[in-house]
Amino acid sequence: MNILFVCKYNRFRSRVAEAYFKKINKDESINASSGGIIKGFLPLDKDEVRVAKNFGISILGKPRALSVELLKSQDKIIVVANDVPKKVFSYGAYKNKVEIWKIPDANEGKTQDKRLSEIIEKIIKKVDNLNKELK
């Protein structure tokens, strides 16, 4: 089974979901990856990398953009964002494989670390539930 976590730029939310899923999933027949609907060109945010590391999650690496080939090879596509419309995935062989997790971007209210921690905690809870469903 192939699972793809998607967010806007593949710089934080989808990367956290992918890394945490890989950390907790023990079923080697399930592969997880991530990508962004917009090709990322900015470096990873140092605060996001640091706060994720505090949770034992490494999100280092280059952001990855989606492609039709990547989408077609997935059994499950999880949009880890509230700013990516499901309509983007309403075409092709992958249209019935999409699940939306309305996780907010890291740009609203509160102190940066608190905001990032809350987002990571939401993603961890969703990934834990997904992992239980897949067993």
Image (spheres, grey):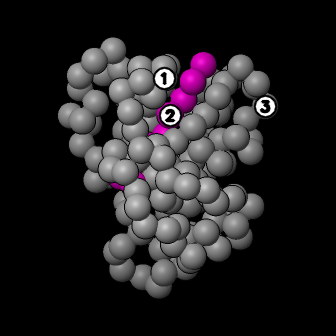
Q: Is residue 55 above or below residue 7?
A: below
- Residue 52 picture location, percent across and down: 63, 65
The amino acid marked with disc number 3 is Lys
Q: Please tell me how crowded label 1 is: few (under 14), some (14-19), or many (20+) other residues with Cα within 10 Å.
A: some
- Report how many numbered discs are placed on residues in the image: 3
Name the quarter where the C terminus is drawn: top right
* Residue 30 in view in this figure: yes
- Mark 1: secondary structure: loop
The amino acid marked with disc number 2 is Leu
2 falls in the magenta region: yes
- Residue 129 picture location, percent across and down: 59, 38
Q: Which residues are magenta?
A: 1-9
Name the quarter where the N terminus is drawn: top right
**Which circle marks residue 4 in the picture?**
2
* Dots 3, 2 in contact, CB < 8 A: no
109 falls in the magenta region: no
**Which circle marks residue 74 in the picture?**
1
Q: Residue furthest left?
A: 87
Residue at numbered disc 3 = 26
**Which circle marks residue 62 in the picture?**
none
- Residue 40 picture location, percent across and down: 40, 57
Q: Residue at x 74, y 61 (%)?
A: 56
CA–CA distance in space, label 3 to label 2 = 17 Å
* Dots 1, 2 in contact, CB < 8 A: yes
The amino acid marked with disc number 1 is Gln
Q: Please tell me how crowded label 3 is: few (under 14), some (14-19), or many (20+) other residues with Cα within 10 Å.
A: few
CA–CA distance in space, label 1 to label 2 = 6 Å
